[in-house]
Image (cartoon, rainbow, N blue to C red):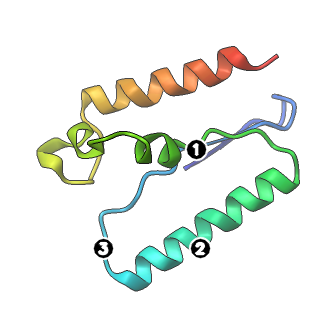
């Protein structure tokens, strides 16, 4: 999910959550698309928040999903995402 606000000085916010599909082709294509988007944002000097990176650095990211299944976040998962975005916004300017 990409959040874009042209009035916000060209900044772009990306919430990138892995889809629950697990086929190798889908995962490869998903990662390819992710890298392509991040490369574009970096090249264009657009600031972004990479939620995927945040969750990949957590020891047990499945604890933020109900029944440990990557469908949607639990309340704690959404709280973690919200706090991460707030921290990034507070560091701007």
Name which residue lies at 24% across and 34% down: 74
Dot 2: within a 10 Å radius of its alpha carbon, few (fewer than 14), some, or many (20 or more) residues? few
Query: Which residue position holds label 2?
Result: 32
Q: Residue at (29%, 40%) from the top-left corner? A: 73
Residue 86 x/y as whole percent: 56, 19
Pick the residue in front: 75 or 80.
80
Which mark is drawn over residue 22? 3
Image location of residue 17, percent across then percent down:
43, 51
Q: Picture coordinates of residue 48 (x, y %)?
A: 69, 40
Whole-angstrom CA distance, mark 3 to mark 1, is 21 Å
- The total of numbered circles placed on residues is 3
Horizontal side, residue 45 vs residue 47: left or right: right
Callouts 2 and 1 close, C-beta under 8 Å: no
User: In the image as oriented, which residue stretches furthest toward the bottom?
Assistant: 25
Where residue 23 appears, as percent x and y from the top left, is 32, 81
Q: Earlier in the sequence, mark 2 or mark 3?
A: 3
Element class at badge 3: loop
Q: Which mark is residue 50?
A: 1
Which quadrant of the figure contains the C terminus?
Answer: top right
């Amino acid at each position: 999910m990409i959040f874009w606000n042209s009035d916000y000085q060209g900044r772009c916010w990306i919430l990138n959550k892995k889809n629950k599909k697990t086929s190798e082709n889908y995962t490869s294509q998903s990662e390819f698309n992710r890298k392509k988007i991040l490369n574009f944002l970096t090249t264009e000097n657009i600031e972004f928040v990479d939620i995927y990176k945040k969750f990949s650095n957590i020891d047990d990211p499945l604890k933020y999903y109900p029944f440990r299944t990557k469908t949607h976040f639990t309340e704690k998962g959404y709280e973690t995402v919200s706090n991460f975005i707030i921290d990034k916004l507070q560091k701007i300017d």
